[in-house]
């Protein structure tokens, strides 16, 4: 059994999590740069100042991707490497880095996929009100044009925004991620609306200025519940829960973030539960926001569940397998999530992130044996295959992440990579899962159907 011939096999990263060089060559400060210096925001007081030094080591990293047979590399642009203050003069050295990265990828037969925003918001713009400022969508559109002018002759695949559920929900609602703020529903609705406008104006900008035919989407966080069993009632219950909007957690809702873009308006439930706290929607806003896009990028790691301080959330049970993030292993999330999203929105699905953190280290034989990650990938990819066979259009799979990297407030303890990084020496070691992924790609998926573990 194999996937379709044009299935995208790739891996992903994000600028702040891998690049380092946080002050190099004219780069400006973003909110993660600034807040991490406080030392109390991230495990062990860690930060992304150096990270994996991808900024200086990207050529060897690209060669490693080629060795692993990676065909697509999803990476993000650090806004303040391009515009140190978020607007104003362009930092040509910053643009040059991304141009060199794109060239290195293409020289190695790897297709670049760009995420324009992956949480590293310019500090100077944050200090001008950030996403609360009515000009924020224009700031983002202007930044987008600079990147499109510089790279769209060689880049076709674009994702505007990565996981607003998280950077808004955790950065401006629960306050655990930069800028570590906690806002009320009215502000969160206003921030969300400005993020939507930024997405829409970026899509317009890419369509207007791209030098090659663009394929545009976004990358959204884990969105769907999975049914308790396969009875029609259980499936409908999971579907309803997956697209519900409630007042207390609306910034984590799938429908809140996707309906305006893909269905042309906020879900009615959003108007119902937010009432006067709903964003101030100006004439023309919804038309900008619902600019046609080409795919729905879904970052799916586990079945959606309501966290619980004790007992078990819906996606867990006594002694269930868990990753190093303590996330339950729920492969069925990559069947039901894409299925429910495709039913509702009718857009091809890109699995823009999936992967697991595990307790990896370089072992006495000099290798990194990670059988759990291999088993995880087999189980999740079998569900992707099953979902495709059932009629859902899934474009591809971007493993998160190519490298061990900075896992936000968890720092560097959590290792998601196909490649191990010793942060003291920047030594890379391809893990067994990296060689397994090479087999998967070379066999166009057939390797995931072997139950026995191959040693590398
Ligand atoms: C996310 C982000 C990534 C994370 C990854 C593991 O989905 O939260 O896109 O930056 O590092 O998902 O949590």
Image: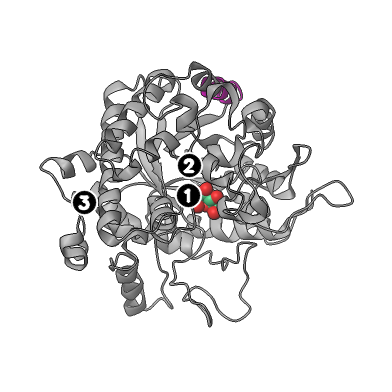
Q: Secondary structure at mark 3?
A: loop
Label 2 belongs to which residue?
A: 31
Crowding near the residue tagged with mark 3, few <14, some 14–19, many ≥20 C-alpha atoms within 10 Å: some
Instruction: Give the numbered dot on residue 288.
Output: none
Q: Quadrant of residue 441?
A: top right
Q: Is residue 105 magenta?
A: yes
**SS for callout 2:** helix
x and y percentages locating residue 136 in the rendered image: 30, 37
Side (left or right) of 416 relative to 270: right
* Residues shaded magenta: 98-108
| 424 to the left or right of 145 | right
| Count of numbered circles in the view | 3
Q: Give the spatial CA distance, label 3 vs label 1.
A: 30 Å
Asked if the residue under mark 1 is in contact with the one under mark 2, i.e. CB atoms within 8 Å, the reply is yes
Q: Residue at x 63, y 40 (%)?
A: 442
Question: Which of labels 3 and 1 is toward the front?
Answer: 1
Q: Residue under label 1, please give it.
A: 178
């Amino acid at each position: 059994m194999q996937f379709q011939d044009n299935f995208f096999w790739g891996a992903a990263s994000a600028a702040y999590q891998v690049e380092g060089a946080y002050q190099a060559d004219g780069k400006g400060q973003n909110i993660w740069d600034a807040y991490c210096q406080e030392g109390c925001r991230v495990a062990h007081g860690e930060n992304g100042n150096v990270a994996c030094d991808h900024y200086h080591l990207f050529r060897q990293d690209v060669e490693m991707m080629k060795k692993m047979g990676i065909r697509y590399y999803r990476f993000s642009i650090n806004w303040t490497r391009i515009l140190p203050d978020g607007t104003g003069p362009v930092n040509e050295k910053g643009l040059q880095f991304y141009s060199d990265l794109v060239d290195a990828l293409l020289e190695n037969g790897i297709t670049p996929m760009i995420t324009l925003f992956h949480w590293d918001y310019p500090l100077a713009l944050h200090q001008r009100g950030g996403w609360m400022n009515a000009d924020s969508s224009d700031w983002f559109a202007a930044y987008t044009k600079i990147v499109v002018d510089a790279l769209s002759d060689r880049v076709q695949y674009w994702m505007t925004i990565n996981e607003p559920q998280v950077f808004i929900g955790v950065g401006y609602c629960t306050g655990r991620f930069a800028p570590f703020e906690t806002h009320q529903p009215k502000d969160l609705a206003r921030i969300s609306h400005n993020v939507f406008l930024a997405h829409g104006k970026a899509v317009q900008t890419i369509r207007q200025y791209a030098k090659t035919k663009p394929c545009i989407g976004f990358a959204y966080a884990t969105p769907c519940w999975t049914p308790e069993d396969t009875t029609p009632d259980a499936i409908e219950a999971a579907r309803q829960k997956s697209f519900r909007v409630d007042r207390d957690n609306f910034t984590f809702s799938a429908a809140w973030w996707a309906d305006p873009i893909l269905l042309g308006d906020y879900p009615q439930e959003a108007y119902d539960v937010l009432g006067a706290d709903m964003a101030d929607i100006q004439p023309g806003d919804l038309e900008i926001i619902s600019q046609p896009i080409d795919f729905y990028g879904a970052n799916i790691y586990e079945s959606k569940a309501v966290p619980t301080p004790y007992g078990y959330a819906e996606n867990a049970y006594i002694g269930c397998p868990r990753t190093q993030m303590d996330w339950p292993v729920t492969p069925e999330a990559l069947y039901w999530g894409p299925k429910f999203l495709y039913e509702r929105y009718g857009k091809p699905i890109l699995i823009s992130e999936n992967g697991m953190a595990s307790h990896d280290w370089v072992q006495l034989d000099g290798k990194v044996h990670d059988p759990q990650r291999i088993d995880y990938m087999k189980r999740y990819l079998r569900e992707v295959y099953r979902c495709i066979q059932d009629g859902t259009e899934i474009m591809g799979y971007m493993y998160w992440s190519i490298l061990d990297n900075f896992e936000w407030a968890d720092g560097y303890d959590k290792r998601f990579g196909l490649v191990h990084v010793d942060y003291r020496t920047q030594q890379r070691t391809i893990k067994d899962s990296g060689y397994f992924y090479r087999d998967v790609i070379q066999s166009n998926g057939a390797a995931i159907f072997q139950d026995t573990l191959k040693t590398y």
